[in-house]
Amino acid sequence: EPEVTQTPSHQVTQMGQEVILRCVPISNHLYFYWYRQILGQKVEFLVSFYNNEISEKSEIFDDQFSVERPDGSNFTLKIRSTKLEDSAMYFCASKLSYEQYFGPGTRLTVT
Amino acid sequence: AQSVSQHNHHVILSEAASLELGCNYSYGGTVNLFWYVQYPGQHLQLLLKYFSGDPLVKGIKGFEAEFIKSKFSFNLRKPSVQWSDTAEYFCAVNARSNAGNMLTFGGGTRLMVKP
């Protein structure tokens, strides 16, 4: 069964550094998403992406964040200058119609 | 904006006990409803979903959920839990009118089933 994959599984970075989280969505899917879950808190929506542009974003998704689908298969989330409060599990998801399929997540630790 | 609340944060049951996890949502329009499960160390997996039709939906592993529109609820049930059901369960909704269909999650319920 096709699945969403994410790399790396764990990323440790220093405050102020840039990080890129990578996702490979399911190949025929059209919508792509990033969510995050800070330890002990809810899973929160960050951004959705369709037809090569952002279709919706939350208040969390400020100018420090960007997304890209550079080559038709990867879907990346970039955080330009990480803060301590960016430490969280980041989940990528993709969908064709109504059901979103989630990847295993990348645990980002900012020190 | 939609919101989702799950009333139980932690539930501990013995094997064969019945399970009901509460989920209520707040949104003025039509929604799609989901339950996701996250087993220890694994990613979010869809248990079941409701889009329209019969409000009682059946999912994988013997789970079911009932959509009660008048109560804005979508409670998850299982008649007899197993140790392998130990996991965190998330209720989620999205607005059907929104093409992007971002999911809004509840806070999750951590279920522990004692053997």
Image: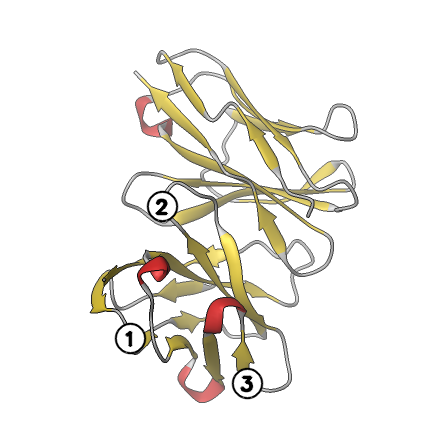
Which of the chains bears the disc numbered 2?
B
* Residue B106 occupies quadrant: bottom left
Residue at the location (31% across, 23% down)?
Answer: A84
Of A84 and A24, the residue lying toward us: A24
**Compared to B76, does A21 lie above or below?**
above
3D distance between C-alphas at marks 1 and 3: 25 Å
In the picture, which quadrant includes the C terminus of chain B? bottom left
3D distance between C-alphas at marks 2 and 3: 30 Å
Numbered disc 3: secondary structure: loop
Q: Which mark is residue A55?
A: none
Residue at the location (53% across, 59% down)?
Answer: B46
Dot 3 amino acid type? Pro
Percent across and percent down for residue B92 are 47, 62
* Residue A24 occupies quadrant: top right
Percent across and percent down for residue B9 are 24, 60
Residue A102 makes an appearance in the image? yes
Percent across and percent down for residue B113 are 25, 62
Q: Which residue is mark 1?
A: B16
Horizontally, residue B101 falls left or right of residue B46, namely right
Q: Which residue is mark 2?
A: B40
Numbered disc 2: secondary structure: loop
**Compared to B3, does B51 lie above or below?**
below
Mark 3 or mark 1, which is nearer the start of the sequence? 1
Of B104 and B46, the residue lying toward us: B46
Quick one: which residue is furthest to the front in this view? Answer: B115
Do callouts 1 and 3 point to residues on the same chain? yes
Q: Which residue is mark 3?
A: B55
